[in-house]
Image (cartoon, rainbow, N blue to C red):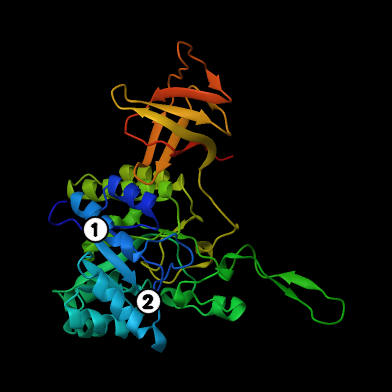
Amino acid sequence: MPPSSPELLAPAGDATCLQAALDAGADAVYLGLDRLHMRRAAARNFTLQDLPGVSRLCQDRGARLYLALNSIVYEPELPAATELVAAAAPHVDAVIAADWAVMDACIERGVPFHVSTQMSVSNSAAARRLHGLGARRIVLARECTLAEIAAIRAAVPGLQLEAFVHGAMCVSVSGRCLLSHEAYGLSGNRGECRQPCRREYEIRELDGENAAFVVGRGYVLSPRDLCSLPFLDELVAAGIGACKIEGRSRNAEYVHTVVGAYRAALDALAAGALDAARKQELVERCRKVFHRGFSVGHYFGRPASGDFTDGDGNAATCRKEFVGRVRHYYPAAGAVDIEVQDAPVAAGDTLMIQGVTSGVVTLVAQHLRRDAATPVRVESGWFTVACPSRVRQGDRVYRLTPRA
């Protein structure tokens, strides 16, 4: 990573996503354990026992590891929060904190900590005070504009600033929402959000003729996803030192695709080659995986009505179908043996293989083989095909096709 280039920070919701992030060129990854973070229910997450191995893997790849402990901490949980900080300290480069109790535990033990976006730091006075208390980095409120980021950067020059560059946006202020808690008793501030904002609603008459009216057009509480590739150069120029990709609850191909696109963008920016055509190419790459449409977030001011979704689900331009599993990999031949269990495979299909150790491997099945035969289509049984990277027995295999 060039010295002037911001850190590319990637989500790791499970071991496969972790591998995918590292393979795609992440400079750092962030993850959560089984408690006290904002994706406790949505992501598969890790355990405290996993941390030493995850730490070694990140060190081997030259990547930093951050632990998210960024939910509200209640009084009975104070001992657990302190114990988690102490246990994680030898294995992580920093803790991401949103509660003063977690920050206090980090300060007492000399553990570097980053202030989560959950604290809604949106001005230089707050950033300066937290920096003075020991915060190494501030993850700025998502409501900050480019101009405000530049002003904070100028006012607190010694502090690292991090901002979200891609992923889901929340209709509430920096994610501090009570809607899920009111509707289901499951708090988004405790990592349990059921995302009631991602649904369509109607107003229904309680008496009389029971008339009902749809609220607005589409999903009026559900913002489009953030994509900053078209203005990534402006964001970096404003003074961002770390670019965070959201998505600990999303799958491995999302992580691999989006992290890879931003890696390419940052490298091109460092080389002076991030022009409009390159930006658009990388945006289209990101469209292939899960998203709700793209917006610029708050970076240029308050979002307008067009920045909210008009559908209930995935707007990806590609879809995947489960094919089967890897039976064997032949390193000398650079080939994989695949057992077809569901969707058939034809010569020329694009396949994606995912596994905990393999990460995400994509290939074009140019020539299918079964012993001496060269079938053009395999609907059941097994076949072999050239594979550019090592994969493992039991890895899942998918076929990628354009979404209609």
Crowd around label 2: few <14 · some 14–19 · many ≥20 (10 Å) = many
Looking at the rendered image, the disc whose residue lies closer to the viewer, 2 or 1, is 1
- Give the SS element for disc 1: helix
The tag earlier along the polypeptide, 2 or 1, is 1
Where 348 falls versus 130 (above or below)?
A: above
Left or right, 2 with respect to 43, comes to left
Q: Position of residue 300 (x, y in %)?
A: 37, 67
- Between 22 and 78, the one lying in front of the other is 78
Q: Position of residue 172 (x, y in %)?
A: 48, 75
Q: Quadrant of residue 34?
A: bottom left
Do the residues bearing badges 2 and 1 touch, measured as CB atoms within 8 Å?
Answer: no
Disc number for residue 276: none
Is 76 situated above or below 167?
Answer: below
Q: Residue furthest top?
A: 372
What residue is pinned by disc 1?
A: 55
Image quadrant occupied by the C terminus: top right
Image coordinates for residue 143, horizontal then vertical, percent: 38, 73
What is the spatial separation of the Cα atoms under label 2 and label 1, in whole angstroms? 25 Å
Q: Amino acid type of disc 2?
A: Gln
User: With 77 as the anchor, is 91 left or right in this view?
Assistant: left
What secondary structure is found at the residue carrying circle 2? Answer: helix
Whether residue 151 is visible here, answered yes or no, is: no
Amino acid of disc 1: Ser
- The residue indicated by pointer 2 is 118
Q: Residue at x 44, y 68 (%)?
A: 40
Q: Hey, which quadrant is residue 180 in on the image?
A: bottom right
Quarter assignment of residue 328? top left
Q: Position of residue 329 (x, y in %)?
A: 37, 29
Which residue is drawn at the image coordinates 25% and 60% (left, top)?
52
Q: Which residue, as the protein is rendered here, is positioned at the far bottom?
A: 75
Query: 269 or 13, which is in the foreground?
Result: 13
Q: Residue furthest front?
A: 49
